Image (spheres, rainbow, N blue to C red):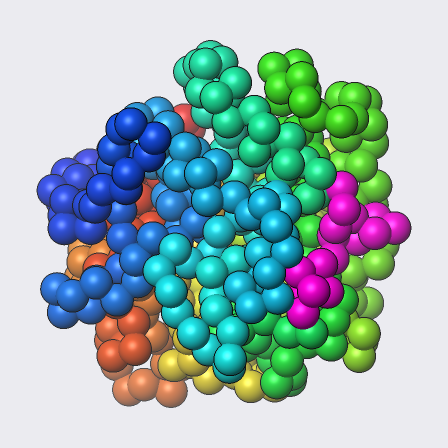
Amino acid sequence: MEKARRLRQLEAQAKTTLRHLETEYAYKDDVLHLYHAGLCRDQVRFGLFGRDLLITARLLNKPYFTHDVLQFLADTLGVKMDPITGEEPGRGIHEYEHMEMRGRVTRYNAIDVTPLFLVTAHEYLIATNDTSLIQEIADQLSLAVQFMQRHLVDGLFVEDPAYAGASQYALRATYWKDSCLPGRIDPVYPVTYALVQAQAVAAFRAAAALVQVVSGIRASSEELSSLAVHACDALFQRLWNSVLNVPLITQDQQGGIAGISSDMLHMLAYLEPGDISKRHLHAIEQSARKLATPCGYRTYAYGHVDYDPHAYHLGAIWPFEQAIIARGALRHGLWRVQEVANRVIGVLEAEGFPELVYWNENQAIEGALTVPGQGCNLQLWTLAVPSALLALEESG
């Protein structure tokens, strides 16, 4: 009861604060109500991001929010090959605003947006039975399924700029931890991210269900369900590191990138209980202890190559990820993991709704928090954390 009370209070604060990120997007003869990804000292640092909007929609579970997000994703879905932006047919947008890096543009530098688009569309349909929106974006959903099929190579969901006619992307990694990969300057393409592999499993299942409503999908429900099983098998048979006894972070043409990462907990939210053996689940739960802090789970474990407690994606703690980890933990019965993820409640009470926080095990005061200068002081998907955790608390 006390936890629910604290979350309701945070949820009310988040709802009031959300208006600071609100913006409008012209869509056909209408206007969509969307939200910037982050503010730094009251200035927009990150604008419209496909991934951030979709994850926020899933965490909030508010149909009105998800409705506009799906329309935006459909309106900006890739339709052609572009080696500068990384665009290809069916590829979801990463960053709407023009951002140049390394002689390229980040606009379509995300491999996980398309699977998230399909998963979110399916969840919206289940929650609302609003077939009219699904029919409205049916062509884009069909294109997204083709993207998924094209990128599934012998069971592995692969990322490769060659699909866009390029040799690299503007970003050094193209899933949510997009600043860098441990031990690599750039991945040697093609590459498979274990977390995105799990998202692909969920996306193929979503596509299999959407076939009933979207007639343009060029595959049967049975065929798409079979691809989900194939991808799930590949996750644990070909992307599992037997030395650390955890999933690889990434596998590229140079080999596997191993390390104890929050990816292994994050991915559980996209898998069904029957997808993962008790042996694998137990191994993940045991390894997760090396990621646990008084503030939740850090992104990467102490002692691994390139680890730094103040590193953006290789040591810091991201509040939004705690909500996803808690959801996956509840789904798979990992109560201890859920308890650690719920520690983020104290972070939000102390710090507001920042992009990320640090916890350094060598600090004199245990549990001391600092909001890093490189992070946003207000982040969209962090605002969704109280609602997501409250829903889990009330579900039981």
Decide which of 132, 313 is in the foreground and name it: 132
Image position of 101 (left or right of 146): left
Q: Is residue 82 above or below residue 332?
A: below
For image coordinates 81% across by 67% down, the residue present is 242
Image position of 244 (left or right of 131): right
Image position of 186 (left or right of 266): right
For image coordinates 14% across by 69% down, the residue present is 41
Question: Residue 259: image x %, image y %?
Answer: 65, 73
Decide which of 38, 102 is in the foreground and name it: 102
The N terminus, quarter of image: top left
Q: Is residue 198 above or below residue 33?
A: below
Question: Residue 47: image x %, image y %?
Answer: 30, 58
For image coordinates 44% across by 38% down, the residue present is 75
Q: Magenta region: which residues?
A: 149-166
The reply to whether residue 241 is visible in this rendering is yes
Image position of 275 (left or right of 285): right
Decide which of 38, 243 is in the foreground and name it: 38
The reply to whether residue 263 is visible in this rendering is no
The C terminus, quarter of image: top left
Question: Residue 372: image x %, image y %?
Answer: 28, 77
| Residue 162 drawn in magenta | yes
Residue furthest right as drawn: 154
